[in-house]
Image: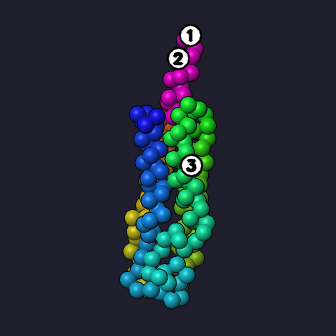
C-alpha cells in the first residue's frame, strides 16, 4: 500500500530510476565528431542499449515492488535485483565514458542531472530495503508473541 514508508521510498526510487530515461548524463557545447557518445553533444542512455535496459529494468522493478506489499520477502528480492541493475548501469555508464574520454579531446564536458539520479536511486532503494526489513522483523516478532 502507498501509506507504508517503503512504498514511498520505492516510488521515489522508481522516479529517479526512470528519470534517467529523460535526462542526459553529460553534455558538451559543440558536437565532437571523433566521439561516439558526444557526437550529438549529449551523453544519455540512448547512446547504448545496455544502459537503456539496465536503468529501465531498475525503474520497472521498483514500481513492481510497490505492489508486492503482501509478500515482503519477494519485495526485498525484487528490490535487491533492481538495486544491482542500477549499480551495473552506473558501472557501464562510467566504463563507456572512460573509453570515450580520448575521443572527446579538449572539449569541456558539463555534467547533467541524469548523472546524479542513479545515486539518488541507490539511496532511496537502500532506505526502502531497510524499511521492508524493519517491517518484516516487526511482523515476525508479533508472530512469536501469539
Determine the secondary structure under disc 1.
loop
> Residue 90 appears at what percent x and percent y?
54, 61
Q: Are marks 2 and 1 in contact (CB under 8 Å)?
A: yes
Which residue does the image show at 44% across and 46% down from the upper left?
11
Q: Are marks 2 and 3 in contact (CB under 8 Å)?
A: no
Please name the residue that numbered disc 2 is placed on: 142
From the image, state whether disc 1 or disc 3 is nearer to you. 3
Determine the secondary structure under disc 2.
helix
Q: Nearer the viewer, residue 2 or 49?
A: 2
Q: CA distance from mark 2 to mark 1?
A: 7 Å
> Residue 27 appears at what percent x and percent y?
42, 76
Give the mark nearest the N terminus, 2 or 3.
3
Q: Identify the image quadrant of residue 114.
A: bottom left
**Looking at this rendering, what residue extends furthest in the top direction?**
146
Q: Is residue 134 magenta?
A: yes
Disc 3 crowd rating (10 Å Cα; few below 14, some 14-19, many 20+) is many
Residue 51 has which mark? Answer: none
Disc 2 crowd rating (10 Å Cα; few below 14, some 14-19, many 20+) is few
Please name the residue that numbered disc 3 is placed on: 61
> Residue 42 appears at what percent x and percent y?
45, 77
Placement of the C terminus among the 4 image quadrants: top right
From the image, state whether disc 2 or disc 3 is nearer to you. 3
One can see residue 6 in this view: yes
Give the main secondary structure of the magenta stretch. helix
Q: Is residue 40 magenta?
A: no
Specify the segment rendered in magenta. Answer: 132-146
Please name the residue that numbered disc 1 is placed on: 146
Give the mark nearest the N terminus, 1 or 3.
3
One can see residue 115 in this view: no
Q: Is 84 on the left-hand or right-hand side of 42?
A: right
Amino acid at each position: 500500500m502507498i501509506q507504508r514508508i517503503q512504498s514511498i521510498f520505492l516510488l521515489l526510487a522508481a522516479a529517479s530510476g526512470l528519470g534517467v530515461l529523460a535526462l542526459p548524463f553529460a553534455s558538451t557545447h559543440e558536437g565532437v565528431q571523433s566521439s561516439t557518445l558526444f557526437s550529438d553533444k549529449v551523453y544519455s542512455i540512448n547512446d547504448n542499449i545496455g544502459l537503456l535496459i539496465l536503468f529501465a529494468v531498475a525503474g520497472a522493478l521498483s514500481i513492481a515492488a510497490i505492489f508486492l506489499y503482501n509478500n515482503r520477502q519477494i519485495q526485498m528480492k525484487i528490490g535487491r535485483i533492481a538495486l544491482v541493475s542500477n549499480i551495473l548501469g552506473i558501472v557501464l555508464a562510467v566504463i563507456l565514458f572512460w573509453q570515450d574520454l580520448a575521443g572527446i579531446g579538449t572539449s569541456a564536458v558539463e555534467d547533467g542531472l541524469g548523472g546524479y539520479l542513479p545515486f539518488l536511486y541507490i539511496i532511496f532503494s537502500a532506505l526502502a530495503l531497510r524499511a521492508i526489513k524493519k517491517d518484516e522483523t516487526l511482523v515476525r516478532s508479533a508472530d512469536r508473541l501469539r
